[in-house]
Image (cartoon, helix red, strand yellow):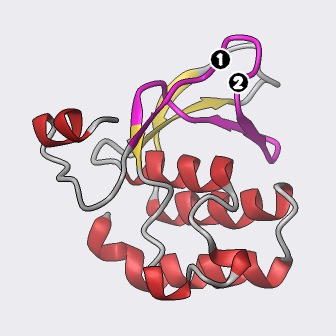
Amino acid sequence: MTDAGQVREGLGTDVRWYIFRNEPHNRLTLDDGTQYRIPDDTRHNFGSTPWIIQFIRYFRRDRYPWSVTLHDAAYRPEHILWVSRDGGATWAKEAVTQELADTLLRVGIIAEGGPVWVARAYYRAVRVFGWNNW
């Protein structure tokens, strides 16, 4: 988003925000038996990782883009993700819980090739500090 677009939406300009859009031929999906997809036009900032730990390569803001964007989408005020329980044949928007959103982040980081210890660290951080953003 541009600075003007961010100001217009009340997001400020201290952090760069992005608009997520699925491509029809390449929809980003996390599948753990139930499939979860990010709603189009989700505004996200690749997570709220404090700048002080981003110098560690495993914790850079853009290291696990699908997982972090899915988590950001679930943390939006509506708490809505696209969900499919039939192998992707049908999709419906559903509200998700904070616990599910945090679990999807952990599972997603591992699915994106992240080490288990990093997934656990992210999970613990959002469980401890995420409540004030939910």
At label 2, counting other C-alpha atoms closer than 10 Å, the crowd grade (few under 14, some 14-19, many 20 or more) is few
Query: In x, y percent, where is residue 103?
Result: 64, 65
Magenta range is: 18-42
**Pointer 2 with pointer 1, Cβ within 8 A:** yes
Does the segment drawn in magenta span residue 101?
no
At label 1, the amino acid type is: Glu
In the picture, measured across the screen, residue 85 lies left or right of residue 95, that is right
Give the residue at x 32% y 59%. 15
Q: Which mark is residue 5?
A: none
Residue in the foreground of this view, choosing between 52 and 10: 52
* Main secondary structure type of the part rendered in magenta: loop
At label 1, counting other C-alpha atoms closer than 10 Å, the crowd grade (few under 14, some 14-19, many 20 or more) is few
Numbered disc 1: secondary structure: loop
Query: In x, y percent, where is residue 128?
Result: 45, 86
In the picture, measured across the screen, residue 31 lies left or right of residue 59, that is right
In the picture, measured across the screen, residue 9 lies left or right of residue 125, that is left
Residue in the foreground of this view, choosing between 19 and 126: 19
Q: Which mark is residue 27?
A: 2
At label 2, the amino acid type is: Arg
* Quadrant showing the N terminus: top left
Question: Whole-Å distance between the Cαs marked 2 and 1?
Answer: 6 Å
Task: Tell me the residue that label 1 is attached to.
Answer: 23
